[in-house]
Amino acid sequence: MSTYLRRTVAEQSKIYQAIKDRAAEYLVLHTCFRKSAVIADLNLEAFADSIRWDYIRDMLQDIHKDVEIIPMAEAFFKGYIEVDGVKRQNTPALQKRLPERFIASGHGKKAAGYVLAVPDNGHFVLKVMSHKNAVATGTRKAADKFTRNARLAGVPMPERIEVSR
C-alpha cells in the first residue's frame, strides 16, 4: 500500500479544497500568492511540510484551463535582494532585469509561492519559456544521439518511433 497522497484523494480533501480556494483568491486579488500566507490564513502551520503544492497548482490550472502559474522563489516576496554583494530593493524593474533570480528553478531555489502568467509578469513567462525550450532541445538531442548509437551498434530500429501522449 502506498504511503504517498494520491492526487485523486487530495482533490476530494476538504483541506486541499480550502487551500486551493484561498490560493485562487490571492491570485485573483494580487496575481500571486505566497504559500506561507495561504497556510497561515487557514491555520494549517502544523501541516505545512505535508502539503503537495504541485497538486494545488494542478488543481488551479485544471479549473482555469488557459492559465499558467509560475513557481517563484522566496526572493520574489522579499523587500530586498542581494545583487552582486549589494542589498537592493526588490522592484519591478529589478525583477524585469534579473527574472531568473526570482523564478524557483535551479540552484536549489524552492518555490515559496506562485505568480500568474499575465502581461505584467511577461518577463517571467519569457524566462520560463526559454528554459523549457532549452530542456526540450537538449532532450531531443539526447534522444537522437541514443538512437544513432543504437543503430551503429546494430540494434534493429524502426525509422519512426510513435510517441504515446
Image: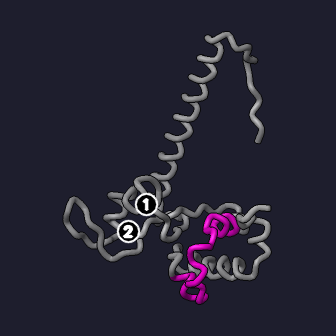
Main secondary structure type of the part rendered in magenta: helix
* SS under mark 2: helix
Q: Position of residue 57 (x, y in %)?
A: 63, 66
Which x, y percent locates residue 56? 65, 70
Judge whether 149 appears above or below 43 on screen. above
Tell me the amino acid under the disc marked 2. Answer: Ala
Task: State yes or no: discs 1 and 2 in contact (Cβ < 8 Å).
Answer: yes
In which quadrant of the rendered image does the N terminus lie? bottom right
Q: Residue 165 placed where, x, y %?
A: 76, 42
Q: 65 or 74, which lies in front?
A: 74
Most distant residue in the front direction? 1
Rendering quarter of residue 162: top right
* Depth order, front residue of 91/33: 33
Which residue sits at x=66%, y=76%? 20
How are the residues colored?
one colour
How far is the residue under mark 1 from the one under mark 2?
9 Å
Q: Please give the name of the residue rendered at 74% of the width and 22% of the height, measured from the top-left corner.
A: 160
Q: Which mark is residue 109?
A: 1
Give the residue at mark 2.
Answer: 75
Q: Position of residue 102 (x, y in %)?
A: 40, 63
In the image, the segment drawn in magenta is 37-60
User: Please, is residue 66 above or below residue 91 in the view?
Assistant: above
Question: Is residue 8 placed above or below 158 in the rendered structure?
Answer: below
Q: Image point 74% across, 13% down: which residue?
A: 156
Count up the numbered dots: 2
Give the residue displayed 42% in from the left and 70% down from the top: 74
Amino acid type of disc 1? Lys
